[in-house]
Image: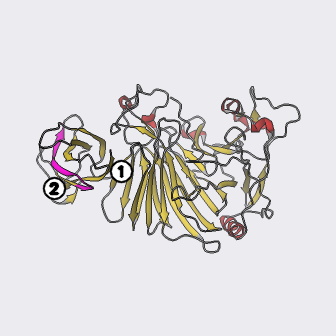
């Protein structure tokens, strides 16, 4: 099944073409130059773009835009032996905003002009007299050939501030963004754009590729630095400085967009041949103090907005933990081979909140899950928010605690005594107790509820099919109860042995 992998916006997206009529761009040689320029721009009103694409490119649909392919032998930096290479995307269809590129060689920036000869237009041949765009709409980055003895596309930037990466063994899935603004909260959502990129010209054998980017929008201007390295885990070091032209309702660092249509915990399931359809199935949160939290994703009738107030966050990320093909049965989309992400904060993530937004959807075409970090202290036009984090695209975040592997619930057997019986079954991997235990030793299970419901039964058993533990508990949920927050922990002598299963149940 085809999944349109890049969400242009949660609720809306302005598709005008970016052009700057503000002060001429100064030479950008270092990140400090870019930070200074972003600070200057932030103290001036934002000027909306006015340029338009030629009607031919403006009117391209999905199939027509796909016909336009970058010529592989024209890749930027392909003359550098065993080096990273850059290919560009042509504006059209959803991606109508030309972006400007530069390369920095020995400290000197040089513009990378648009060149139509870099593309094979296939059956989308422009008519005589067509005006070509002033820039490209995005880029893809290829790893050195020595990594897999072939061309390996691992990173794509296209559309507003969206970007995605893969590993050497996992395919495309969820998307990241440079910044999220007013995703929820009542104010119109904004989608600032990466309008300029500067590549540091790579040398043969370089392990890391570096580039800068300017983020510009109605309320914000920012300078970004990226250092990327692909592999079985693709690692990005992202750092930057943000300046606000005006106050915003919500500013989200390290935002991600993913898709969850249905999983083993979804009721009712669509009439689809596949048991599950999702790019991610949970949000993992690691705190400096406090439990490690696993929040399973779900898709209900109403928008869900969960907020985790955290004083010291060590890491977080949307995960695709289910890797069993039999749980998806999709040979085309291969949801069991999608990347997970993990954010390791370095700077700018002190006191704040982690948001998880789950938007109802009836299909797999659009991303409907968003996560982001909201810092408590916001920047101004003169006082920046400086931030840095490692972003890892990987199979799964590893840790020592017992991990949640599946979350299921359903109606129990109603009786006169318990007319509203609901059963919850949570599978964990087998954790590591503090001391040697007997082979049949079982941890203690602790269940807590926020909302009107009663715990009828709870227990833990060995799961011989998985080699792990299964937590089982029953709740009496009155018909009037529409929402519950439920947690489940496995304990060893009162100490955490597992992740905290943190679930939002809705009728």
Of all residues, the one furthest to the bottom in this rendering is: 382
Left or right side of 238 for 361: left
In the image, which disc is placed on residue 295?
Answer: 1
66 w.r.t. 485: above or below: above
Q: What colour scheme does the image use?
A: secondary structure
Q: Which residues are magenta?
A: 448-463
Of pointers 1 and 2, the one earlier in the residue sequence: 1
Residue 449 screen position, x and y as percent? 25, 55
Q: Position of residue 113 (x, y in %)?
A: 79, 48
> Can you say whether 105 is above or below 15 in the image?
below
Q: Dot 2: within a 10 Å radius of its alpha carbon, few (fewer than 14), some, or many (20 or more) residues?
A: few
- Judged by its main secondary structure, the magenta piece is strand
Q: What quarter of the picture does the C terminus occupy?
A: top left
Q: Judging from the image, what secondary structure is the residue with disc 1 in?
A: strand
Examine the image and state in which quarter residue 222 appears: bottom right
Q: Which residue is mark 2?
A: 435
Query: Count of labels shown?
Result: 2
Q: In the figure, is residue 131 to the left or right of 479?
A: right
Inspect this view and state whether residue 199 appears: no
Q: Measuring 81% from the left and 32% from the top, which residue is drawn there? A: 126
Residue at 64%, 46% in the rendered image: 159
- Neighbour tally class for label 1: few under 14, some 14-19, many 20 plus, Cα within 10 Å: many
Q: Position of residue 265 (x, y in %)?
A: 33, 39
Where residue 298 sits, quadrant-wise, is top left
Q: In terms of secondary structure, where does tag 2 sit?
A: loop
The residue at 60%/71% (across/down) is: 384
Can you say whether 389 is above or below 145 in the image?
A: below
């Amino acid at each position: 099944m085809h999944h349109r992998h890049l969400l242009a916006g949660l609720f809306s997206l302005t598709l005008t073409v970016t052009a700057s009529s503000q002060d001429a761009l100064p030479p950008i040689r270092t990140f400090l130059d870019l930070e200074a320029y972003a600070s200057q721009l932030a103290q001036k009103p934002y000027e909306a773009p006015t340029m338009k694409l030629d009607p031919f490119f403006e009117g391209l649909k999905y199939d027509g835009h796909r016909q336009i392919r970058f010529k592989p032998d024209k890749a930027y930096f392909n003359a550098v032996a065993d080096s990273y290479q850059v290919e560009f995307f042509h504006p059209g269809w959803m991606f109508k905003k030309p972006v400007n590129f530069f390369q920095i060689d020995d400290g000197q920036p040089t513009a990378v002009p648009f060149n139509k000869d870099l593309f094979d237009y296939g059956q989308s041949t422009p008519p005589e007299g067509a005006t070509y765009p002033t820039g490209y709409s995005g880029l893809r980055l290829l790893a050195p050939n020595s990594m897999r003895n072939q061309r390996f596309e691992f990173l794509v930037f296209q559309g507003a501030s969206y970007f995605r990466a893969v590993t050497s063994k996992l395919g495309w899935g969820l998307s990241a963004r440079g910044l999220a603004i007013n995703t929820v909260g009542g104010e119109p959502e904004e989608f600032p754009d990466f309008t300029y990129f500067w590549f540091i010209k790579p040398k043969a054998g370089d392990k890391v590729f570096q580039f800068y980017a300017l983020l510009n929008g109605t309320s914000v201007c920012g300078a970004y630095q990226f250092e990327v390295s692909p592999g079985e885990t693709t690692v990005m070091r992202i750092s930057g400085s943000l300046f606000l032209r005006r106050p915003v309702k919500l500013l989200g660092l390290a935002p991600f967009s993913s898709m969850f249509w249905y999983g083993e915990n979804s009721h009712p399931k669509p009439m689809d041949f596949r048991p599950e359809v999702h790019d991610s199935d949970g949000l993992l949160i690691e705190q400096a103090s406090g439990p490690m939290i696993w929040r399973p994703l779900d898709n209900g009738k109403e928008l869900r907005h969960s907020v985790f107030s955290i004083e010291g966050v060590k890491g977080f990320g949307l995960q695709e933990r289910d890797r069993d093909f039999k749980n998806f049965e999709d040979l085309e989309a291969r949801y069991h081979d999608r990347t997970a992400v993990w954010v390791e904060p370095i700077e700018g993530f002190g006191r704040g909140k982690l948001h998880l937004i789950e938007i109802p959807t009836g299909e797999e075409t659009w991303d409907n899950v968003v996560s982001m970090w909201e810092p408590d202290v916001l920047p101004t036009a003169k006082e920046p928010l400086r931030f840095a984090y490692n972003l890892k695209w990987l199979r799964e975040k590893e840790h020592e605690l017992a991990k949640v592997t599946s979350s299921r619930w359903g109606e129990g057997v109603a009786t006169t005594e318990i007319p509203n019986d609901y059963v919850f079954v949570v599978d964990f991997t087998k954790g590591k107790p503090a001391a040697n235990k007997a082979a049949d030793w079982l941890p203690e299970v602790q269940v807590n509820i926020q909302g009107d419901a009663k715990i009828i039964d709870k227990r833990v058993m060995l799961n011989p099919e998985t080699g792990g533990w299964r937590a089982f508990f029953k709740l009496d949920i009155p018909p009037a109860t529409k929402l519950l927050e439920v947690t489940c922990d496995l304990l060893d002598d009162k100490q955490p042995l597992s992740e905290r299963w943190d679930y939002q149940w809705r009728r």
